[in-house]
Image (cartoon, rainbow, N blue to C red):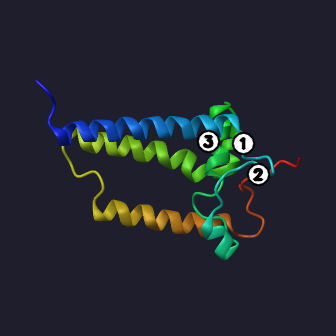
Amino acid sequence: MTAPVGRRSRLYAGLGGAVLGLGAVTYVGVVDPHRPGAIFPFCPFKVLTGWDCPGCGGLRMTHDVLHGDLAAAAMDNVFVLVGLPVLVLWAVLRRNRGQQVFSTAVLVTIGIAAVVWTVVRNLPGFPLVPTMLSS
């Protein structure tokens, strides 16, 4: 018996997404985003405002985590380094309990935390900033 078309399409889409995600993580692990000239997407928020957004340094952080350098990863983006695993754990626990994963209150809290992090990380002299290595 064959799977229904909609189910098969979701399976293929999921597999395709997983392959693309694995390829992206592999690229970030191999190509060092700390190096000038590395080919990575730019941050439109930073280009428009000159400020680091909540995700700025995320690619560098991912590279550092893949290479086991958690201190450098925290320097690049401690908000995502800590926040993403906490958010995933939260979602898994809520889903296992049959509860709504992202209520309005949770989404508002995430939004406020991101805005506060953006302001704090852009204060003059704030020590945790994405790093760039010279060539």
- Amino acid type, residue under disc 1 in the picture: Ala
Callout 2 environment at 10 Å: few (<14), some (14 to 19), or many (20+)?
some
In the rendered structure, the answer to whether residue 69 lies left or right of residue 8 reads right
Which label belongs to residue 62? 3
Please say if the residues under marks 2 and 1 sit with CB atoms less than 8 Å apart: yes
- Of 44 and 70, which appears nearest the observer? 44
Q: Is residue 44 left or right of 18 when viewed as pictured? A: right
Identify the residue under disc 2. Answer: 131
Q: Residue furthest bottom?
A: 49
Query: Residue 111, relative to residue 4: is it above or below?
Result: below
Q: Amino acid at mark 2?
A: Thr
Which numbered disc, 2 or 3, marks the residue that appears first in the sequence? Answer: 3
- Which residue is located at x 37 percent, y 35 percent? 15
Q: Which element carries disc 1, helix, strand or loop? A: helix
Q: What SS does tag 2 mark?
A: loop
- C-alpha separation, residue under disc 1 versus residue under disc 3: 10 Å
What residue is shown with label 1?
A: 72
